[in-house]
Amino acid sequence: MLVNHQQYRTIWPNFEYVQPCVEVIDQTKLPHAFEVARITTLAQMITAIKTMQVRGAPLIGAAAAYGIALSTLDSCSDRHLQQSAELLIASRPTAVNLRWAVQRMLSALLRLPDAQRQSAAWSEAAHICDEDVKLNQAIGTHGLVLIHAQYQQKARTINILTHCNAGWLATVDFGTALAPIYAAHNAGVDVHVWVGETRPRNQGASLTAWELGQHGVPHTVISDNAGGHLMQQGQVDMVIVGADRVTATGDVCNKIGTYLKALAAFDSAVLGHHVPFYAAVPSPTIDWTIDDGLKSIEIEERGAEELSWMSGRQADGTMATVNILPHGTQVANPAFDVTPARLVTGIITEQGVFAPQQLGMMQR
Ligand code: MRU
């Protein structure tokens, strides 16, 4: 059975259960199993964010909003909500959407009397989700123009390279980097996607390839190290990635390895290929308080086990996890990097496409 975003969002509330709760697509099970996880407490939501049952900047923002709604089931006092907010913000440090969503929840709730806070929390979280869907659809519309221009000029398949997963699984629906690609495919533009596997967690190989396959978009998984080579060979027409945080000056923080793709795209000009590098970014991903991504963005350091262990499905259908490192090997696992604005061709937002130095022209 095909599963795609016409049937599911990634997160939704369930008011039919014994208590109000939240359900999510469990992304740790994909691509081998499609499972829905039920989340009934704030603590469970924090675990879901940390273990990446839910992941992707816009989705962890939405999940954190529902985390606050779940915490109102215990208490609606100022102190309790503020403590819940701190725990959620600390669960993953790099994507600014999480802090943005939590602060929006607090400012909506703290001005209300306690008795009104619970129902207001569920409805504000739902608004955040609905808005995310609209922002991503608009990103799709603006990004489609860029892809279509390439298609008209070249009159052949347009090859787009992406990294990690910035599709509908990383958002409430539609995705950011993949929204223009879905829009192009749906409009009959001949697109093919190079999908970087995205070690160590393989969000490209596991999630982006799964999504694109479910939607029927032609794609090919490549090792993370192949992107530069393909760009030198003229086999990439454009790079589109998502972001976890963008500075006011257009520095783009995204999944580790993004910077190397941007460097290769920049250098492709020397060979005459001029591969443009775009980040697709809804406005809650822009951190207007900072202007130097390298100095100001905390880069999440994740566990060594993500590098030392690999898991997957064996030929007999059972899952297996194996260690690939010599015993006792030291491991470093920074999860994100910063691509400086000078390497970024444009930022595709819900308000249109901006050169990094023009980002300040966006309406806030
Ligand atoms: O560690 P993850 O899987 O949460 O990282 C996700 C990414 O880096 C995405 O590219 C980013 O969040 C943009 S999602 C629309």
Image: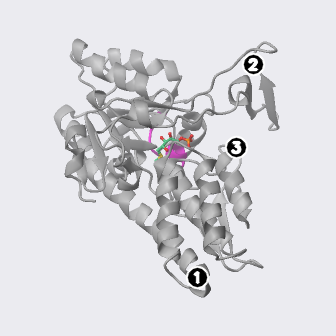
Location of residue 220 in the rendering, given as x and y in whole percent from the top left corner: 49, 31
Please say whether residue 73 is one of the residues in the magenta stretch. no
Q: Is residue 28 left or right of residue 209?
A: right
Which residue lies under the disc numbered 3? Answer: 32
Kindly tell me whether residue 314 is visible in this rendering: yes
User: Camera-side residue: 167 or 298?
Assistant: 298
Location of residue 197 in the rendering, given as x and y in whole percent from the top left corner: 55, 29
Q: Is residue 227 left or right of residue 250?
A: right
Q: Is residue 326 above or below residue 26?
A: above
Answer with mark 1 or mark 3, whichever residue precedes in sequence: 3
Q: Is residue 125 above or below residue 286?
A: below
Regarding mark 2 in the picture, which secondary structure is present there? loop
Kindly tell me whether residue 167 is visible in this rendering: no
Numbered label attached to residue 119: 1
Q: Amino acid at mark 2?
A: Ile
Regarding mark 1 in the picture, which secondary structure is present there? helix
User: Camera-side residue: 214 or 169?
Assistant: 169
Which residue lies under the disc numbered 2? Answer: 324
The CA distance from mark 1 to mark 2 is 49 Å
Report the span colored magenta: 211-219
The CA distance from mark 2 to mark 3 is 21 Å
Residue at image point 17% right, 35% down: 153
Mark 2 and mark 3 in contact? Answer it, CB < 8 Å.
no
